[in-house]
Image (cartoon, rainbow, N blue to C red):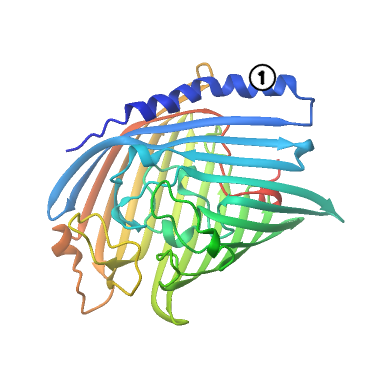
Amino acid sequence: MGFPLPSRSLLLVLAIGASAPARAAAQHRHEPAGETTAEVAVQAIAVVTRAQPAIAGRQLTEGYVTQPLIMGHARLRGGRVSLFGTADLEGLTLRRGELNSGIFGEGYVDRRHPHTFVHEIVATIGARARGTDLSLSAGKGFAPFGTDDPMTRPFVSFPVNHHLAQVLERAVAIARARAGPLSLELGTFNGDEPVSPGSIPSLSRFGDSWSARLTFMPVSTTELRASHGEVASPEDRGGKGMDQRKWSLAARHGSREGADGERYALVEWASTEYLSRGRAAFRFESVLGEAAAEWRGLLAAARLERTSRPEEERLTDPFRSVYPVADVQILGITRFTIGTLALRRRLGREQGYHIQPFVELSHAFAVAATRPAVFEPADFYGSQHLWSFSAGVRFDTGSSHHLMGRYGAASPSP
């Protein structure tokens, strides 16, 4: 059992949160109406998770502060210019990672890795011409690919497919156009993933990767999305690793998370091919469906996911793998089928704060997807059936930009 005590970072989050509503209100009072608006939001989640088994038949119970975020959004010149920023303090609170069976990425396995301190900082310039909304965005943030950041969805635990279904924390330049129900986003960015919470994108590699996303919104609450991306050597900063070819199809319905009477649903398919000298060497796929409904302040959510992931050589710490990777080190493919149920109670706001106690229960079934297999899940974990139970409290204040990565003309209509 382990309970890190990141008290200073948590106090910092809470202190900023305490002043956020007042600062935003002050800006609204002093700026001319319709010219400049600014919003600040803070979020933090205190959670205890029990994994049974976590590894080698052992049960683990851990507690920490996860998703400590400070978010800002400003609109200038009547909304023609906008700024998005998110600071993520997980590098202080989740240095060893967060228990999350099946998840992988950036050298962490079965633990979710901490994101970088600068999660996103993006500036956007917009214009309108002949009935079409146009925008150009640049900064560090989300590439136009796949679905929304799991931190904006109704679960605390992340889906296994996080590194298949999103491309984030890159230096990006994105052009967007929206006409009626259709929007098209084209982006270029650096392929390399972060190597630590404090790392910055390798600017020498900017432009070696690209992605495109087409969105159709028949009504304001429903969207259909198709994405494609070509990502150069994400797991090796020097550009010597395998490239990735990515596809995503998704349908989403729902209003903003936390709104009274919320109805939310997402169905997505994602595929990533690892390319060796331009040829497909490995393929990983994911199918995910999740839904949530709220009644009188009680939010109930369910998720079912089936995702395959690579198995790579692990270090003496069994939750870590060799990273960065310069060569092929995939020992096998494991398929995870995971069902998750969550309940969250939204308590009344007091002085601009929101307190939400929650519980989550998930069951994962892990099996080798290829035979013969070097990596056998039942031998490694002690069982093919992995249970996880989490309970905690979510704190937030202010008005967050609840759909991260939606910049400029790709943003939902107000």
Q: Quadrant of residue 2?
A: top left
In the rendered view, would you say 84 is above or below 242?
Answer: above
Q: Which residue is pictured at 60% across the width and 60% down the height?
A: 225
Q: Is residue 347 visible?
A: no
Q: Position of residue 154 (x, y in %)?
A: 45, 42
Left or right of 157? Residue 277 is: right
Q: Which residue is pictured at 62% across the width and 30% down the height?
A: 39
Q: Nearer the viewer, residue 322 or 398?
A: 322
Badge 1 amino acid: Ala
Q: Which residue is pictured at 33% across the width and 41% down the height?
A: 94
Q: Nearer the viewer, residue 281 or 388?
A: 281
Q: Quadrant of the N terminus?
A: top left
Left or right of 246? Residue 112 is: left
Q: Position of residue 249 (x, y in %)?
A: 54, 64
Q: Please, which residue is most extreme toward the top here?
A: 351
In the rendered view, would you say 160 is above or below 4?
Answer: below
Left or right of 311? Residue 203 is: right
